[in-house]
Image (tube, helix red, strand yellow):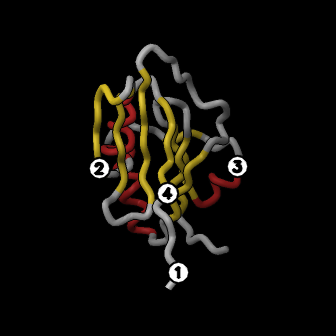
Amino acid sequence: MKSFPTLRVARPSDNLEALLTFYRDGLGLDVLYRFEGHDGFDGIMLGSPSAPYHFEFTKAQDHVAGRAPTQDNLLVFYLPAKEEWEAAVDRMEAAGFRAVPAFNAYWDRQGITFEDPDGYRIVLQNAGWKA
């Protein structure tokens, strides 16, 4: 059996609470861990305990992280089941987040793009991914 490592996507932020609302309440991820004052950093990790990935957002004291460098910095979630995809879109909208036009129009064909408080974008793609 081939094993795969757990993937952590880590990035800085200036507003952890706003990201918490986006990724927990909107995207539906669980808070896996939270820390404060760890060598000058505060942070949150979000994901699902059973998923092979999670996200870590950190805020460094006395450091400005800024916004996403482009509108094409994406995390894409492939949701092939129509009902699951619709529920994910509904949850984002119920949490107060509105879709934005994708920078690359390809993502608008079968997906919906949302921008997080730092300007990074996630796509909820109603399709399966094939290599």
Q: Residue furthest bottom?
A: 1
In 3D space, how far apart are the residues under numbered discs 2 and 3 (Cα atoms)? 34 Å
Q: Which residue is mark 3?
A: 105
Q: Secondary structure at mark 1?
A: loop
In 3D space, how far apart are the residues under numbered discs 4 and 1 (Cα atoms)? 16 Å
- The amino acid sitting under disc 2 is Leu
In 3D space, how far apart are the residues under numbered discs 4 and 3 (Cα atoms)? 28 Å
The disc label shown at residue 7, or none: 4
In 3D space, how far apart are the residues under numbered discs 3 and 1 (Cα atoms)? 36 Å
In 3D space, how far apart are the residues under numbered discs 1 and 2 (Cα atoms)? 26 Å
Foreground label between 4 and 3: 4
Q: Secondary structure at mark 4?
A: strand
- The amino acid sitting under disc 3 is Ala
Q: Which residue is mark 1?
A: 2
Task: Say which residue appears at 42% left-offset and 42% top-offset.
Answer: 56
Mark sitting earlier along the chain (1/2)? 1
Q: Which residue is mark 2?
A: 32
Foreground label between 3 and 1: 1
